Amino acid sequence: MQTMATDQRSLDLHPLRRLLWHGRFIIFLGALIGTISFGYYALFVADPVYRATTVVILETRTGEIADIDAVLTELSGELPEINTEIEVLRGRALMGQVVDILDLTKDPEFNGALVPDGWQTRIKHRLRSLIMAQDPPPPTLTWEREAAINALISHVSITAVPASFVFRITAESSAPEKAALIADTVARAYMDGQIARKEAVTRDALTVLKARVDQLGLELAEAESRLSAFASSHNVTPGAAQTGNTAGQIGQTLRELTQYEREAEATRDLYRDFLGRMKETEALLGMIRPDSRVLSAAVVPNYHVEPRRVQLITMGLIFGLVGALAMILLREAMANTYRQPADLAANLRLPVLGQMPDVPAKGRAGVVLHLAERPTSPAAEAVRGVRTSLLGSGAGTLPKVILCTAAKQDEGTTTLSVALAQNIAAMGKSVVLVDADLRQSAMDEVFGAGTGKGLMSVLSGDAVIEDALFTAQPYGFDVLFGMIGGFPGVPDTLSSDRFADLVALMRDTYDVVIIDAPPALLVPDARILARLADHVVFAVRACSTTRTEAAEALKAFREIPHLPVALVLTRGPSPELPRERTRWSTTGRTAYFGQ
């Protein structure tokens, strides 16, 4: 039966979870700062904004053009006319009238010249005066009025209700009463403007009609005068042309009389018509009404619409979290240090024995005690992992001489050396821990004063090694202190044959010799000692040792032929013990065990 391997794409969220866990304090701080900042702005800085709305409806024309309503109402309700009225409501002319009615040039909300200049404005004015070599001119009344109109336009919005002749005039202000007053004033100014336009048109028409009536009156008087003069001169009675019985009676005189009578009658009819129109127009002056009316006046709002405090605080929390995550990702992208053992292996291209976390003990003296009393703690398990890796590197046997060093101080080298000595001794091996840091010894902080003699005593011939060794009880390994008995540190002695013979003697006497060396970048001691070692364990402190420092320090050890060098990540978070974890894949949830 042929089986096919299925390629399942999986998404391991463990690195992301670890990254977020390492940056949890930044995330918490970002969320806290964002929430507090936006909350403070919403509660104490932002000016409240109140909104009031006046609803206006257009009254469209429904009668014939000859009706009186045709003069009173000029709108037909067509879409272009509705859009035109919206633009009239938004226009600067109408807003200027509102500014004048409410005297908004004296309101700091609409006249920025009344607000004291802040430090940003003062700096801007100062820079402008330096560039232009003169101070900006003071604001004029015209400028202040135009600025108030601009501010009012930004505070008022006009919207049309779809499929209707209804407009909503919405005004915003920092005071609720002012918002309602502005909305109602805009509506009133709009309707007053309609009345004013109609009155102006009507008065213009009345002026034209009066002039025409006066002219027709003169023409009528002249026509009647001509008729009367003709009748008197020919001794003819007006109307005789119409009452004659025979055609013979109608002569030239009667025909002319008839012509004068017709002209007078036509002028009289025109005079009566225009006189009637003039009287109707005079009557309309008291009957003019606007093309719109208020459906509902603005109500003084009892709550503000801005700032929206809950939304602002929520936005501050979101911005804080996003900013913190961006900072974490940026820090991760720009990180020049090491966080995980995998980072060491990928960058330095050397085997990694494991990671050694900070031992949760009080002082260096409690390190060995903690590891001995808590063999299942994360720190003890980590040391056991490093020891197991050392066994694997030596084909099942531990190196005889192990040199522990780092790039600089405070990398956890001494803690690693002591922990390895205790762990290997627990296996039944004979172990000696040599303090080769002749400048800044730390072994006395771990084990106390010791025997009063040490490495320098043996090298100077003042003591034999048996008298200088200190047995760390009850851990079962020996310690050879470095600076004991007041001897000065002499690094040159580490390259002497006497020191090489001492290392050879300890190699023959003990199963494992662990040398705690000083930092490789500070002094050359570690490079000298490495030539006598079988294996170098290089400590790299998590999130502290830079990639440049580690590479530069390891350069000297790479030059020594056939010298194994391995890395240990120190002083990082406690490694996770093997346990059941969950991997999310495209096919479902799958459980597996492992680091």
Image (spheres, rainbow, N blue to C red):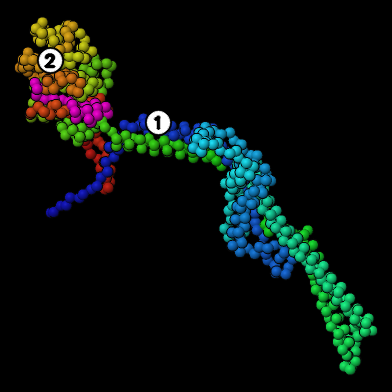
Is residue 537 a member of the stretch shown in magenta? yes
Residue underneath mark 1 = 29
Measured along the vertical axis of the image, is residue 383 above or below residue 251? Answer: above
Q: Which comes before the other along the chain, label 2 or label 1?
A: 1
Amino acid tagged 2: Asp
Residue underneath mark 2 = 492
Amino acid tagged 1: Leu
* Residue beneath the point at 68% across and 51% down: 189
Q: Secondary structure at mark 2?
A: helix
Say which of 503 and 595 sits in front: 503
Q: Which mark is residue 508?
A: none
Say which of 198 and 45 sits in front: 198
Q: Position of residue 368 (x, y in %)?
A: 21, 17
Q: Residue most toward the front? A: 133
CA–CA distance between discs 2 and 1? 51 Å
Density class for disc 1 (Cα within 10 Å; few <14, some 14-19, many ≥20) is some
The stretch of residues the image draws in magenta is 531-553
Q: Position of residue 191 (x, y in %)?
A: 68, 54
Can residue 339 be seen here? no
Q: Position of residue 242 (x, y in %)?
A: 88, 86
Number of marks: 2
Q: Is residue 72 left or right of residue 148?
A: right
Quadrant of the rendered image containing residue 16: top left
- Name the mark nearer the viewer: 2 or 1: 2
Q: Position of residue 593 (x, y in %)?
A: 22, 36
* Residue beneath the point at 45% across and 37% down: 316
Quadrant of the rendered image containing residue 244: bottom right
